[in-house]
Image (cartoon, rainbow, N blue to C red):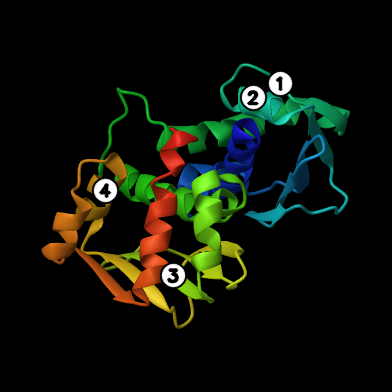
Amino acid sequence: MIDQLKSRLNLKAVLRNLEVLPALDPVSAELISDWNISLRFSVWRDTQVVLDFHDGRCVFHSDSKESTSVNLFFSSPAHLNNMFENQASPLPLKGFTKLGFLKKEFSQLIGRLEYFLKPAAETVQDEAFKKVNLALSLNTAVFAIPELMKLDPVSRRIAPQFSAGSLQFSVDPDGPHAHIIFDGQSRAVAFPGPAVNPTAMTVFKNSEVAQALVAGTLDSFAAVATADIQLRGMIPLIDHSNVILDRLPLYLQ
């Protein structure tokens, strides 16, 4: 189950960031500007996602069965996880003529994602870098919540306690934002950007506070006491989500 959950997080929380990366990073936007291709990542007897590139955009589809230009198959969740650790390659079932694209152009895009999410020690982390890193890190965390609710044992016990509603995470004054909608029946769907009339909100005073939390150097309880983090609305949605988010480092580093 650990491999299964980790593979879903890699696809639906990490890889999904390719949908928002071009809007944040001009290099990525230039890379995909003329792409017209769709890629399927499918794990045997488990899950699949599609990345659809067109008109300078990337659209992410979860568990889609639509026809794609390329189909990359993984024999098990562990196989996919090994690819994310550069220890394995997918099995192409369709799109053999696109192998050059996958090795060059698409690999360059993945490299940009890794550059921001897993920066090397020598990476210059200026304000522009920090802005993109924070947005992707926030998205990854929020995107992970629905998958943890399905498969993580602690999160599965908490899932029935969620009332129907929406929870938004925001960094003042100008974002980034991400939100998640709970259906009240142990399921949830996550989205980048702000929610419409959220039921609850976790608001970080500024990007420095949010970055410190992401880096694990912030005492969140003290930050709430000093109003560096503000909790608004239906607090149980926030409390339950925080417990689930505490589980994420067990599967993604």
Q: Looking at the image, is mark 4 or mark 2 nearer the viewer?
A: 4
Q: Quote the CA–CA distance across marks 4 and 2.
A: 29 Å
Q: Which amino acid, mark 4?
A: Leu
Q: Callout 2: 10 Å neighbours few (<14), some, many (20+)?
A: few
Reply above or below: 56 against 102.
below
Is 98 displayed left or right of 189 in the figure? right
Q: Quick check: marks 4 and 3 in contact, CB under 8 Å? A: no
Q: What percent of the width, then of the height, locates residue 87?
A: 62, 16
Return the residue at label 1: 89
Q: Callout 3: 10 Å neighbours few (<14), some, many (20+)?
A: many
Q: Which amino acid, mark 2?
A: Met
Q: Which amino acid, mark 1?
A: Ser
Q: Which amino acid, mark 3?
A: Leu
Among numbered discs 4 and 3, the one appearing first in the sequence:
3
Q: What percent of the width, then of the height, locates residue 131?
A: 33, 50
Looking at the picture, tell me which residue is in the foreground, 33 or 214: 214
Q: What percent of the width, then of the height, locates residue 80?
A: 68, 29
Query: Quick one: which residue is furthest to the bottom in this view?
Result: 197
Return the residue at label 4: 213
Tell me the SS state at disc 4. helix
Return the residue at label 2: 83
